[in-house]
Amino acid sequence: MLEPSSVAILGASDNPNRIGGRPLRYLRDGGFKGEVYPVNPNRETVQGLTAYPSITDVPAAADVALLAIPAAATEQAVQACAEKGVGAAIIFSAGYAELGAEGAAIQDRIGSLAATTGMRILGPNCLGVFNSAVGFYGTFTQSLDRGVPETGSIAVVSQSGAYGSHLAYLANQRGMGVKYMITTGNEADIEVAEALDHLAGDPDVSVIMAYAEGVRDPDRFRAALRRAHDAKKPIVFMKVGRSAVGARAAKSHTASLAGADAVYEALFREFGVYRAQTTDEQLDVAYACARGVYPAGGRLGIVTLSGGIGVQMCDAAERFDLTVSPMPAGAQKTLKDLLPYAAVENPVDTTAQALNDMSLLAKNFEVMLEEGGYHAVLGFFGSVPATRTLADPLKEAILSGTRRFRDRLIVLEMVASREIVRSYEEAGFLAYEDGDRAIASIAALKHLREAHDRPLSAPAPVADPAPLPTGPLSEYAAKRLLREAGVPMLDEHLAADADAAVAAAREVGLPVVMKIVSPDIQHKTEIGGVIVGVGTEAAVREAYGLLRERAGSAAPKAQIEGILVAPMAPKGIEAIVGVSRDPLFGPMVMFGLGGILVEVFKDVTFRMAPFDRDEALRMIGEISGRALLDGVRGAGRADVEALADLLVVVGNFAAAQAETIESIDLNPVLIFEKGRGVVALDALIETRMPATD
Amino acid sequence: MLEPSSVAILGASDNPNRIGGRPLRYLRDGGFKGEVYPVNPNRETVQGLTAYPSITDVPAAADVALLAIPAAATEQAVQACAEKGVGAAIIFSAGYAELGAEGAAIQDRIGSLAATTGMRILGPNCLGVFNSAVGFYGTFTQSLDRGVPETGSIAVVSQSGAYGSHLAYLANQRGMGVKYMITTGNEADIEVAEALDHLAGDPDVSVIMAYAEGVRDPDRFRAALRRAHDAKKPIVFMKVGRSAVGARAAKSHTASLAGADAVYEALFREFGVYRAQTTDEQLDVAYACARGVYPAGGRLGIVTLSGGIGVQMCDAAERFDLTVSPMPAGAQKTLKDLLPYAAVENPVDTTAQALNDMSLLAKNFEVMLEEGGYHAVLGFFGSVPATRTLADPLKEAILSGTRRFRDRLIVLEMVASREIVRSYEEAGFLAYEDGDRAIASIAALKHLREAHDRPLSAPAPVADPAPLPTGPLSEYAAKRLLREAGVPMLDEHLAADADAAVAAAREVGLPVVMKIVSPDIQHKTEIGGVIVGVGTEAAVREAYGLLRERAGSAAPKAQIEGILVAPMAPKGIEAIVGVSRDPLFGPMVMFGLGGILVEVFKDVTFRMAPFDRDEALRMIGEISGRALLDGVRGAGRADVEALADLLVVVGNFAAAQAETIESIDLNPVLIFEKGRGVVALDALIETRMPATD
């Protein structure tokens, strides 16, 4: 479909500005070398080409058929294309699933035609595709009105036709060569995931810009992201619908924080997909990726002609976690000897002096790269290169100073004509009109390199699950299951009478905590069902009676499994670990620290279960409050490794029980100092199976 | 200085590309109508004008003298200018305070010439000024090489010449008319604050873009910000040096979080200055301000030709706290009748259909504004208006639909030639190439309107301070001072012997907390100097002895004032209130919630003392964790009003004691439910006065 040798256009129009006329015009503008068959029952010729009354009459089975015909006629036309042996049909018209049940039914029938006939279908309600390298324009986007784009190594994949074509247009305006645009629309057959997968394997594509509201096939989507990761091919993703978070009805505490967007965020983090927040950012980062130089670390050198701008750039570098480390003393001396008025520590402020002797500037870059060893250098030149007389010497100077360091990223802030900027780009430099955006892009490249260089999570195979008991689970039952799965718990005992409670207390050591255990009482504290700090054996006996009494009066029909006797928990940092089931992606593990941080700041992170220990460690590192784990107020470093193990265990358990468990809530989990482990104090499991009785 | 009728150029050069030649060239390019006197002892003429051997020989005392001469010759030249009666001297050369003590001394001498002679001085080490309305270019910036700018209502004030001229250049590139550029450099005389103050009072200036690393005169700076606020004139400020936060040695806990940048942040918040994080943002917001329509609220209507882009824009609106509220049902019906395929709730997706009948689009805007009542409407049109045939009809349609609503802000996302964009701007629309940036700018305008519409803080006059005792203050002494000032405290008693302790315990009610009180023991808990939960009178007696004993062995030389007996504190939300003294701006009050939020997230806010209750309420509203005060986990709403009163009291106290107090630390302050007030549990005051003995 992306490189057809023949194209049929159903509904081809002689008017080059109509939906059925534009593709023909663009194919001609783009110099498409293959056969083009306009189909139009009312005309002999269309835009000078012989027209055919129907697809059946076309001399050969086209590789691609463009359907620029009304929705009502489409189903039959798709059928005719399939019978003719057309390779792929691209359906432009709208009026399907987006309008309701009737449209959805037609769309489903069209989709199943693809499955039964083998003819692939793009759309409906899409803006088509293009491959600028061969001049194939199977699209009616009006954004090509002002000329077909330059080709290059960038691919655009978008569910939204308007977004995809606008993005391709903006990219082209910035001098970025877009090779492919693929818009998938309503996705009766081909969806974004498949397009991503294909492009991930295309060696001519250096970076993919994607847009999606959601995906249909989670396995295919994950497979595509995996393939892109393994090929070290960046995907710069605009995933929209973030503000719909929380719309889904939330049953458990964990689920209320999940929601579809968090799932995508989790996948993007796992596979190292760069999520862009704005279109500018998407373009900035893709532009940088297309250059193909990914800095090996975050040490940033800054060269400016002005001290003030250097300060601004330092602020930006800190915001994006890049390190503006000082130059070695020797290198500083070298530079100071060259330019006595310059600031030489980093940022290096050459003052405008360097423009009078460009060789000084060259030397500056060279010393910074050789002796400073920076992974990336930002040169801030403003409108200096806009002046023709300065543009070339400046470029040559930077080139001569950086020539020996092709693995380093050289980024310039400069404002000049497209023509001048292009000459800098051709010399191997990235050019941005805004310094902050330049720095943000450097940070993005560093982040992508880290993500691509690390292996993906490789969880241990999940064992066949033990069958769960039916009906709701008590705290005790939930804890038993999770303890068996490997979740560290306190040494707790279920006591059926007061004597057993005393014996248990003796075993775990006084003072103890005592709780009612019942699958029918989920909120124990509200009925006084938890007593802490029970200090003597007599008090244990008394508390046993009291808890029984409270349960009896507050919930006379509740089935009481017994009274839990547990040791008092030592002090630790509180965390919440949960699992919620996404309808599409299955169980997602959530992690957050402390009550306030989760509830007020929503400082949580998610991963699709299962995952390995390194992935769990990355989850922990993503939390804004992670500094708490490094030890504050004199506390030692927390046992992050044990916490990671707990997350892995919970993920494995949730994956094994994916069909049977709706949610898990471990709240709180206490994290102790390094070497002392973690413990889940409370556990709640919500099963998906109704009670059998 | 900004509108001179005569300009002398010392060091005038015949070469129009040299520092001494450029101003002359720009004055000519700009059509400057006043007299120009080149001064050059070596030439008869300079660029065709008669040259004078020295400033003394110039026929009249110029309003402005530009000093394009080496640093070594400058001091003498400034003297000569003053003697000649020149109004103001602008010194371009570098080589003063930025190079060390020697340069600073010369700079000081130059500055004092201004004070003694009345001649004003701009610079040294500055890039000068311009006033594009009269063609006065007292600058050698090479950014004017490609032509002098269009004039307009925007002013640029910058300490950094490079930043200021680059900003003016970028603004001009975006079609923004810059009337004034003022760069202040080393500020021997005129500083940024004075320039801001002047421009705040200039009716021809609609918005000021500023850049500073710091200011010299805090009172003048505050006065300038106040004047701008009262004139409802936006200042869009790039304050750099944020990453230097924390460089200042921190003595107390509070001070370690303060630091110069926090002080500026506090001033910006108090006076409603818009702080830009990036240059793009600074330009985006200033561009929007220059239009002069500030939305009265945050209700945003969105019109797109594509549903997908609407979702993206909703995400952005949420990020910037704008409300995409649905259209009224009647209005939805009206639109649905017009455009059956459209989404009509808001975002309104007209589909590309609207381009075939532009009157539909006009009607859309009209219904949204009239019936939807949105304060601002964003229309997202991408590259549609880039097509000449669509540009005019689209503009006319939007104009006809919005004509009756000139108080609403109409913002368009569009990518087209400068010429087309200009025609839209002239029709009254704001145009952005990126939708997120458009939305960010709408939010900025809303924020600015709120800030300008509210009255500034009007603190009550601060009473003459009672003299503080000399030397370090004990907790008890600090608390007594603060309680007298109006800070709510627990009912605590200082007991000099065990009997008094028992009597005190009886009065405040058992159980009690008991603490050692000594000005020499600041960290009581570390030596076991605090005992909580003392439950009986016997225990009080015992604890008294124990505390005395511990103090005696841990700090035998400490002066013990007694043992504090206090009631156990009820439960409340923990806050920290502190004061630290900024060397320039004096006492700054800090407020933050809870230990973790302050320590891990640095979730604190500052204000210069004193301030009024509304300002204190705004401080509280600025904290990220403020949702805690609304009540989480079933807690009621916290007593925010009492907290605000506490902040005001602390601010007044700190202002009264500005010269004598280094820092105050109230940690924790407990906030109870609404109506139940607040209480400071612990207090520490660090005085600036050494002990006298």
Image (cartoon, coloured by chain):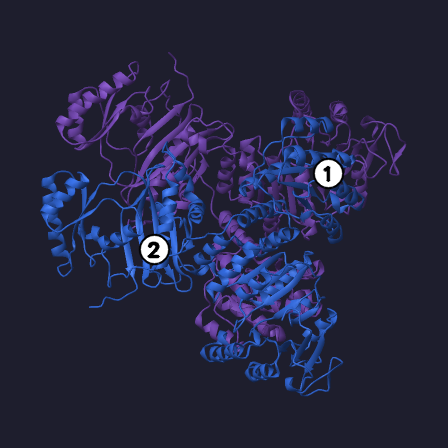
Chain colours: A blue, B purple
Which residue has dot 1 on it? Answer: A401
If the image is split into quadrants, where does the N terminus of chain A sit? bottom right
Outermost residue to the right: B44
- Check contact, mark 2 vs mark 1: CB within 8 A: no
In this rendering, the answer to whether B325 lies above or below B649 is: below
The location of residue A600, given as percent across then percent down, is 37, 49
Q: In the picture provided, is A557 more to the left or to the right than A217?
A: left
The amino acid type found where label 2 is placed reads Phe
Q: In the picture provided, is A422 more to the left or to the right than A95?
A: right
Co-location on one chain, circles 2 and 1: yes
Can residue B382 be seen here? The reply is: no
Viewer-proximal residue, A57 or B443? A57
Chain identity of mark 1: A
Chain identity of mark 2: A
The amino acid type found where label 1 is placed reads Gly
Viewer-proximal residue, A80 or A628? A80
In the image, which disc is placed on residue A653? 2
The residue positioned 63% from the left and 26% from the top of the image is A329
- Considering the numbered disc 2 on the image, is that residue within a helix, a strand or a loop? helix
